[in-house]
Structure formats: C-alpha cells, structure tokens
C-alpha cells in the first residue's frame, strides 16, 4: 500500500469514527463507551486511539465541528432580512446542538473561559459570529440594549443544561427557551429593563 493510500485510509477511518461517535454520544452522553464507538465504526481500539488518544480528544473533535458549524450558520444568518428572527433561529439551532449530547453544555461553558483549550479558537469564532447577530437585533430595536452576546449565550446554555436533568426538565425546554427570548426583548424599544415585582 502506498503512502497516499495509507493517508486516505487513515482519513476515512478518522471521519468514520467521528461520524459514529456523534451518534453514540447522542445516545449515551459524553461518557459514551469508546469500545462501543470503535465496534460500530468497524475499527480496532488501536485505530481509534491513534486518532483520538483520549476521550477528551474525541469530544474536542466533536465539539470543534459543532462550534465551526454554528459559526458558519451565524454568518449565513447575518444577511437575513429579519434580524430578530435570525437571532431566534440561531439560538434555537445552538440549543438543539447543545442538547443533543448530554454533558455537552457544561463542556462548552468550561471552554469559554479557558484560553489554553484546544477548542478556544473555534468557540471564540462561534461566539463572535453570534454576537454580531445579537448586535444587529439590538440595533434594530428587537433586543434590549443592556445585554451582550455572553449574556445570551449563558442564558440559552442554562436552558440546555436544565433540559439535560431528566425527562420532566427536557419537556420544559421549549417553554424555557421562549421565556428567555421574551426576557431578551423586554424593554428593547425603551432601553429600560422591566421593573421588579417586589
């Protein structure tokens, strides 16, 4: 086998492992069995470990794909006619991707503040792209002016975390998401936060 064929085989194995890992982690959460992933990808454990020496390395690769996909999606939505709908759609897609993997939301929030993480660049690019959607919605008067992209990211991530806590909580995800959006819009035109009910 030539070097080119070996590289092509290695790339196919890498992509196959990631493809299967996405499915298995969605089923089992971030503590998914690596042995199960290797079996379903039809590769040996040695092959899996050559590409992903640790569970963390595999999860990082999955997260990087998610961050990059979400960043690209935010960029696509920047030119949408309705800036409020564009932000709502992106946040819903973000929540859906975060909720797909149990335990992923906590990993994402940890990555935000860790500049030494291998995922920091991808996470930052995603947050910056989403921040532009927030700013555009604010400029158009749809979103209250006293928040920033980090506030929005944290609130929707919190909804994702709550939805991971069991079937009852998961059933409230859509409602909680709507409440967050309502809160983001409160006082948008006047620029004032709603008065507390004390």
Image (cartoon, helix red, strand yellow):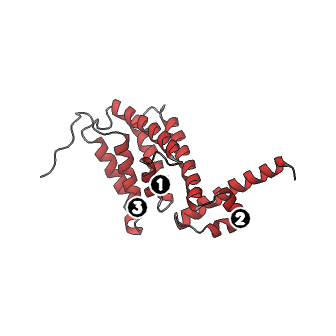
Q: Nearer the viewer, mark 2 or mark 1?
A: 2
Residue furthest to the left in view is 198
Q: Position of residue 191 (x, y in %)?
A: 24, 34
Q: Which residue is mark 1?
A: 98
Number of labels in the image equals 3
Tag 2–tag 1 contact (CB < 8 Å): no
* Mark number displayed over residue 165: none
State which tag comes first along the sequence, 2 or 3: 2
Viewer-proximal residue among 43 and 192 = 43
Real-space Cα separation, disc 1 to disc 3, in angstroms: 10 Å
Instruction: Say above or below: 31 vs 187.
Output: below
Q: Which residue lies at the image location 43% right of the left edge and 57% below the top edge? A: 106
Q: Which residue lies at the image location 48% right of the left edge and 62% below the top edge? A: 102
Q: Position of residue 47 (x, y in %)?
A: 72, 61
Tag 1–tag 3 contact (CB < 8 Å): no
State which tag comes first along the sequence, 2 or 1: 2
Residue furthest to the right in view is 1
Real-space Cα separation, disc 2 to disc 1, in angstroms: 29 Å
Viewer-proximal residue among 24 and 180 = 24
Q: Which residue is mark 3?
A: 163
Secondary structure of the residue carrying tag 3 is helix
Q: Which residue lies at the image location 47% right of the left edge and 41% below the top edge? A: 124
8 sits to left or right of 69: right
38 sits to left or right of 102: right
Q: Quadrant of residue 171?
A: bottom left
Alpha-carbon neighbours of circle 3 within 10 Å: few (<14), some, or many (≥20)?
A: many
Q: Which residue is mark 2?
A: 46
């Amino acid at each position: 086998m030539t070097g080119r064929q070996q590289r092509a085989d290695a790339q196919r194995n890498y992509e196959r492992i990631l493809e299967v890992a996405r499915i298995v982690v969605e089923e089992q959460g971030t503590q998914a069995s690596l042995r199960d992933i290797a079996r379903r990808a039809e590769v040996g454990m040695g092959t899996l470990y050559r590409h992903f020496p640790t569970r963390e390395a595999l999860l990082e690769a999955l997260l990087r794909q998610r961050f990059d996909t979400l960043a690209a999606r935010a960029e696509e939505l920047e030119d949408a006619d309705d800036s409020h709908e564009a932000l709502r759609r992106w946040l819903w897609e973000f929540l859906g991707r975060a909720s797909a993997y149990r335990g992923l939301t906590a990993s994402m929030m940890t990555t935000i503040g860790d500049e030494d993480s291998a995922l920091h660049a991808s996470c930052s690019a995603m947050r910056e792209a989403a921040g532009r959607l927030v700013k555009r919605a604010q400029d158009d008067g749809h979103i209250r002016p006293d928040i920033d992209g980090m506030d929005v990211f944290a609130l929707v991530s919190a909804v994702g975390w709550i939805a991971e806590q069991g079937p009852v909580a998961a059933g409230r995800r859509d409602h909680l998401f709507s409440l967050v959006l309502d809160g983001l819009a409160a006082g948008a035109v006047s620029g004032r936060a709603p008065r507390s009910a004390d």
